[in-house]
C-alpha cells in the first residue's frame, strides 16, 4: 500500500509535544514521516532529520510549504507544533499551498484569524484537525457514545475542571523569579489569556465533544494574582438546551498535575471521567450504584470500545490518545485522496472546534473584565 | 457532678435527625435528657418519654418553654429539630423564656428573623448553637487548625461542592409524582430555596469555618427544572481577601449521596476533605506529593487532633460529628453557669453563623433572579 | 417498657474500648446501665459511677457477680472489657452466677478455657456474645446476605488481610524502647500469639461470618523480628468446600491503620469490603463492571440493608458497628426473658465463634513452629 | 547515525503483543525494523512486510536465523513473540547464529532449557533480554531506586498479587465451553502451569527487580477447579534475608483486569505500586502519612525519575513500559557494538531473570503437588 506522507513544523528533538506527535504517528503504518522544518536553528532541524532518516528538511516553513505544495510527491499533511503565537501564519501558509493541516491547540489568538483559517480549509476542501488530546482516549469516545445512545438521558448539569499546580510559584511575594513561565505572562506571546487559553479550552472542547452541547452564553471570573494574565478562572456556562454547567481551570492548585475531570449528569444517570485514570469511566444509572467501567472489558461493546488497542487493565496512555486522533484523521485523508466525501467521518476535533475554542477564551476574558456579565458565544 | 439537663422539641421516635441528636448527646455524660415535646401527636411524644424514661413531656412547645423557663430545675438548653419552617417561632419562644438553644440548620427563613434571634440571644446572654454537622468532624477541625497555622499560606482559590442524587426523580416528564419531596418544592414550607437552603448553606458554613474567609459578594445561577424551587445551583464567590471560589450544590446528580467535598488552595499548599471519608484529609505542601492524613495518627499532633475519640483507622462517623459539636456547646454552657465568660470558647457554629447562612441563601437566589448579577452579603 | 439492665467489668473512664461499649449501648433505649467494677482502683470505679449516675459499684468482680446473681433486680448481662488475660476467669464467674455475658475478643487463651466457657453458657442457657466488631457494620451484613442469596455463586477463592503499622517501631536495632507494647510481647499476658491473636482472628471471624465457610486446615509462617511473639503472619487456609484462601495480618506495615480488607470471589461474581470505608461494598457480577454499593442507598433492599440507621453518604462509623451487635444481642435477651427460644436469632458472634478464634490462633502458631505444616482445626 | 536493525519472529498484524513490541520499538530512533517471519502462513508475513516497508521476510525462522546470521548487514537483534511453547527452540537458533535476542516471557518451559539458553548467550557474549513488562514503567524504577537508597530501610515483609478475571468462565458446571483458553489448559502447550506461569511469574520478577531480594524457598497451594492446570495460586516465600512474603495470582477474580499490586514494607517505611495506575507510587515514611508520588513531579528527582518521557499527570501507559525496556537494551547493544563492556548497564530483565522465572514456576507447582511442602529455588 502506498503510504501517506507528512512533514512537521516545530518539534526539535527536545521538544516535548513534537516528539509525542511523532511517536503517535508512528502507531499508524499508513503514514510516513518525510520532511520538516523543526527549528529556526537549522542544526536542530538536521538533528531530527538524522534521527528519523528524513528525505528532506527546510530552513523555514514558508519554503517548506511552497516546495511541498508544488512537488508531485509533496506531503499529504503537515503537523504544526510551533509556539502558539505562530500557529495562524504557519497554518495559513500550508493551507494556501493546498496542504492538509493538523495543528496543536490553541488554533490561534483571534476569532478573525480562526475564521479565516476555517474558511481557507473549507474553500480548498482541506482537512484541518486540531489536537485536543483528551478526545483521543478510548473511554472519552465510549463516554460520547453512551451519551449519544441516551444512557444518561437529557443532560441536566455539567461540572468540569482542569486543575494544575505548576504555576503555584507565581503566587505570593517571591513570584516572578522563574524563567519557565515568562512567555505565558506576556500577552504578545500568549494572547489574551494564559490559563483559560492553555487548559480551560480543553474543558470547553471536551464537554462539547462528549455531549454535543453548545454554549449559548457564559460568565466568568479570572484571577491573575498580580500578573498580567490569568492563572485561575471560574466559569458558569448556559447551554443551548437550557441546562447550565460550571467550569474551573487553574494552574496554582498544589497537588494536581493535569487534573482534567468531567462529570455529566442527566435525567437517567451520570458519567464521570478523569484524565489521570483515562482507561476508566464511572457510570451511574439512575437509582443504581456507580459502576467503574474499564476500557477493554467485555461489557464495553462494539462501538467506540472497538477503538481500544490493548486488553483492559493495561493503561493505554497519552501517546495512544494522540494516535487515536491521528487514526481518524488519516482515515479521512485516505477518503479524501480516493475522492470520497470526507469531513463526515470526523470524530477528531477540526478547525471549527479550534475556532470555538478561541471564541470561548475571548468570551471568558471579556466577561471577567466586564464585572462577570454574561457573554454570548 | 450535677448534670446539665436538656429537652427537645421535635424528634419523634422515627425522626431521623432527632434520634441522631439524642444519640450524640448520649456521648456526653455531663448532660441528662429530661423532657420534651416531640410531636403534635401527644401519643408520639409519650413514646419518646417511655423510651428515654423522661421526667416530663408537653403537648405543645409554648407550654414547654413557659414551664421550663419558670421551674427551678428547668432545662439548661433545648434542642430544636422540628420542620425548618417552625424554627424561628420555637427558638424565639425559648430564648424569651431565658433558655439556651441548639437548633438544626437552617436557622430560619428570613434575614430579619435571623437577626431578631441573634439579638435575643445576645441581649439575654444565652448560648445559641446551630448544628452545621460537618464542622464537628475531627479532621474538619484539624483542617481549620492547619489553615490557621499557615500550613497552606494565604488562600488563593476555593472549590467546594455538595452533591446529592435523591431528587433526580424530579427531572423529566415523570416528575412530581413522589410525595417524598413535596414540601421541598413549596416556598411556604421551604422558604426561598430548596437546594441552596438545604445543602448549599453547608458549603458556605464549612468554608467559612475552616478558612475564616468572609464572602464579600457572590453571583449565581440556579436550576429548578420546571419546579418552583431550585434543585441545582452554581455560585461564584469573592472573599474579603480578594480571592474567589466556586460552589456547586445539586440534588439531581446520579451516584452521589452526601458528597460534600471542599478543596482549599493556598500559596504554600492545599487541603482537601470529603464527607464520605471524613477521617481523612489530603494535604499537599507546595512542591511535594499529596499526603493522606488520617485522624488518630501520631503525626496529627496535639491541637485539634486531640479531639479524636478512637484510634485512627476506625471511622468515627456521623454521630461523633454531632457529639463533638455538643461537647463544645456543653463546655460553654458549663462556663456560662459558672459565671465565666462564654461565647469565647466557641468552636461550634452559633446563631451568627445561622444568620450568615440565611444571608447567603438569599443572596444566591437574588442573584439568580437578577440575571446572575453580583450581590453583596 | 421495663428496661434490661447491664453492668460492666473493666472500662475505667480513660479506657478506650470500655467507653466505646458504653456509648454503643447508649444507642439502644431498651437497656439501662446500672452497675460495675471498672478498675482494681476503686476511686476509678467511682469516677464511672458518677459520670453515669450508677446505682451501685463493686470493688471486685467476684463480689459483683455474686451480688448481682442473687439480687432480684440483678443485671441481665455483664460486659467484660478487661485485659485479655482475665477474660476467662471473669466470664466464668458471671456464667456460674447465671448472668449473660458479652465479652471483648479474644475470648480467652486456651482451647480448653474456651470450650469450658461455651459449655457453661450452653448448660445454663445463657447468652454469651463476643464483640468481633466488624461483623456489626451494616455493609458487612449486606455482604453476608448477598453471599447467602447466591449473588456471587459458589466461592472459589478468598483473600483477606488486616494490616496495621503501630508496632513498626519494634523492628530494627532501636526496638524495645516503647512501653506501649510491652505486654503484647509477653506470652504470660498475651497468650501464644500477639498479632494473630489480636487482629488475625478478626480475619478468621469476618470471613466465616460473611461466607459461612469453615476452615478444614491451614498452614502458616509468622515473623517475630527478634521478639518472642509474632508481629506478622501469612496463612493459607483450606475450607470445607475445597476452596482455599490467603490471610495476612501484620502490625509493622507503614501507612496502614486498621486495614481489614476482605475479598470474596465466587463463580458468579465477587464482593470486596474495607474497614476504612465500611459504608461501601464493591460488588462485581461476572462479566460486568465493579459497582460501588453504598449503605443507605435505595438499591440495597429490604434485608440486611434495613439495619442501616442513617441515610447513605453519612458514615455510620465504629460506634454503630458495636451498637448493631448489641441490638441483636439485646433482642435475643428479650426473647430469652420472655421464655422464647433464643440463640436462633443470632446474627452476632457468640462464645462458639470465640472458641473458633482461639482454635485458629493456636493452629497458626503450631503450623509456624512446625515448619509450616498443615494443621487441622 | 547508523541505526541498529532488528527482525521479529511471530507477531502477525492482528497479534496483540507483537504489535506492542513494534510500536514500542518505534519510540526509539536508534533502531530500524528490517525483516521478520511473522507467521507460518507466509501471506500473513507479507502483510507485515507491506505495513512496515520491510526489506526482507522469511518463510520460517530457521532460514531467517541462518540468513541474518551470515549477512554482513544482518540484524543486530531479533524479537521473539511466538507462542510460549516455541520460545526455546527459536531463541536457541538465533543465539547459535550469533544474534542478540529479546524474548517475550515466559522464557521457556523447563529449567534445563533455560540454563542452556543462558549459557549460550553467555558463551557467545550475546545480549538476551526478556520482556517482563512491568519493570519498564518509570515508577517501577523509581521504586527500585528508593529501595536501593534505603528509603524504607531493611525489608520486613512483602505482599504482592496479580489478579485477573478473564478465566472466571472456567469455573462451575458450564466450564470448558470457551475456545479462547483451550491452549492454556493443555500442558503440552502451556508447560507445567497456566496461571503461575502466565502471571505469577510477573510477581516473582517484579519483586526481585525492585527489591533485589532472592527467594530461598517457597510453599504453595494451587487451585485448578477441575481443569488440568492451575487457575489460582497462593504462595508463601522466604527470602535470603529471612523476611517472608505472600504472593497471590489468579485468573478467576471477577472485577480485576491486570491487577498487579506490589507492597514492600521496611523498617523505615513502605512503598506500594499498582499496575492499573502505573504513574503513581504510594510512599509512607515511618510515622508519617502516605504520600502519593507521581511520575514527572519535581520531587521525583534526578535518578530513575529522569526516565520519564512526558510531564506528570499524563499517563505514559503500557507501550512506554516496553519502550523503556527497549531503550536500555538498545543502549547495551550499542555499547556491545562499540566493544564496550555490556551487561553491566542492564536495568532490563535478562535471560537469567527468565531462568529464575522458570525455576519459580516449577517450585510452586512442585510444592502444591507435595502437600505444600517448602521447596528451595
Image (tube, coloured by chain):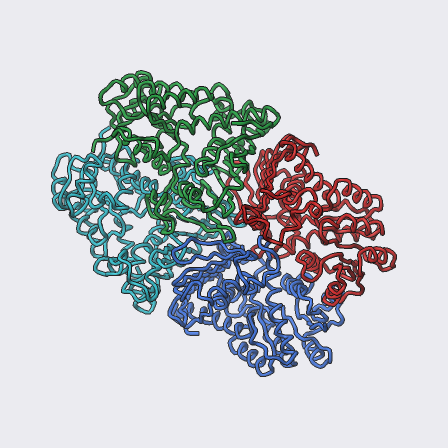
Chain colours: A cyan, B blue, C red, D green
Q: Nearer the viewer, residue D297 or D49?
A: D297
Residue C145 seen by the camera: no
Residue C229: percent from left, percent from top: 64, 43
Figure check: D71 above or below D148: above
Q: Quadrant of the N terminus of chain D?
A: top left
Q: Nearer the viewer, residue A367 or C212?
A: C212
Q: Would residue B197 be found to the left or right of residue C119 on screen?
A: left
Q: Nearer the viewer, residue D342 or B162?
A: D342
* Corner quadrant of residue A256: bottom left
Residue D245: percent from left, percent from top: 54, 37
* Residue placed furthest toward the bottom: B123
Q: Would residue D339 be found to the left or right of residue C304 on screen?
A: left
Residue C195: percent from left, percent from top: 63, 44
Residue drawn at (47%, 66%) of the image: B207
Q: Would residue C333 be found to the left or right of residue C213 on screen?
A: right
* Residue placed furthest toward the front: C173
Numbered circles on residues, count: 0
Figure check: B18 above or below A51: below
Residue D47: percent from left, percent from top: 30, 24
Residue drawn at (30%, 32%) of the image: D330
Figure check: C241 above or below A96: above
Amino acid at each position: 500500500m502506498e503510504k501517506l506522507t507528512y512533514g512537521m513544523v516545530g518539534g526539535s528533538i527536545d521538544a516535548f509535544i513534537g516528539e509525542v506527535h511523532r511517536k503517535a504517528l508512528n502507531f499508524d503504518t499508513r503514514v510516513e514521516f518525510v520532511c520538516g522544518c523543526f527549528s529556526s536553528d537549522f542544526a536542530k532541524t538536521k538533528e531530527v532529520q538524522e534521527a528519523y532518516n528524513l528525505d528532506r528538511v527546510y530552513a523555514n516553513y514558508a519554503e517548506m510549504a511552497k516546495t511541498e505544495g508544488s512537488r508531485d510527491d509533496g506531503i499529504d499533511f503537515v503537523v504544526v507544533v510551533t509556539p502558539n503565537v505562530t500557529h495562524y501564519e504557519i497554518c495559513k501558509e500550508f493551507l494556501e499551498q493546498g496542504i492538509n493541516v493538523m495543528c496543536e491547540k490553541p488554533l490561534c489568538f483571534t476569532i478573525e484569524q480562526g475564521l479565516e483559517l476555517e474558511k481557507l480549509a473549507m474553500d480548498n476542501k482541506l482537512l484541518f484537525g486540531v489536537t485536543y488530546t483528551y478526545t483521543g482516549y478510548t473511554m472519552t469516545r465510549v463516554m460520547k457514545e453512551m451519551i449519544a445512545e441516551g444512557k444518561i438521558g437529557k443532560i441536566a448539569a455539567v461540572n468540569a475542571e482542569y486543575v494544575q499546580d505548576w504555576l503555584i510559584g507565581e503566587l505570593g511575594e517571591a513570584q516572578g523569579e522563574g524563567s519557565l513561565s515568562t512567555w505565558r505572562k506576556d500577552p504578545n506571546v500568549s494572547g489574551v489569556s494564559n490559563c483559560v487559553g492553555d487548559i480551560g479550552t480543553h474543558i470547553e472542547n471536551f464537554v462539547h465533544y462528549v455531549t454535543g452541547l453548545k454554549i449559548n452564553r457564559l460568565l466568568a471570573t479570572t484571577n491573575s494574582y498580580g500578573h498580567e494574565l490569568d492563572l485561575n478562572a471560574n466559569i458558569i456556562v448556559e447551554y443551548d438546551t437550557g441546562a447550565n454547567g460550571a467550569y474551573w481551570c487553574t494552574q496554582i492548585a498544589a497537588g494536581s498535575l493535569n487534573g482534567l475531570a468531567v462529570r455529566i449528569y442527566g435525567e437517567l444517570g451520570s458519567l464521570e471521567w478523569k484524565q489521570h485514570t483515562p482507561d476508566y469511566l464511572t457510570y451511574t444509572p439512575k437509582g443504581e450504584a456507580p459502576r467503574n467501567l474499564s476500557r477493554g472489558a467485555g461489557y464495553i461493546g462494539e462501538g467506540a470500545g472497538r477503538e481500544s488497542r490493548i486488553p483492559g487493565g493495561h493503561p493505554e496512555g497519552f501517546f495512544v490518545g494522540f494516535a487515536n486522533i491521528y487514526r481518524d484523521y488519516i482515515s479521512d485523508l485516505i477518503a479524501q485522496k480516493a475522492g470520497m466525501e470526507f469531513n463526515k467521518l470526523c470524530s477528531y476535533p477540526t478547525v471549527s472546534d479550534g475556532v470555538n475554542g478561541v471564541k470561548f477564551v475571548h468570551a471568558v476574558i471579556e466577561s471577567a473584565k466586564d464585572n462577570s456579565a454574561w457573554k454570548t458565544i
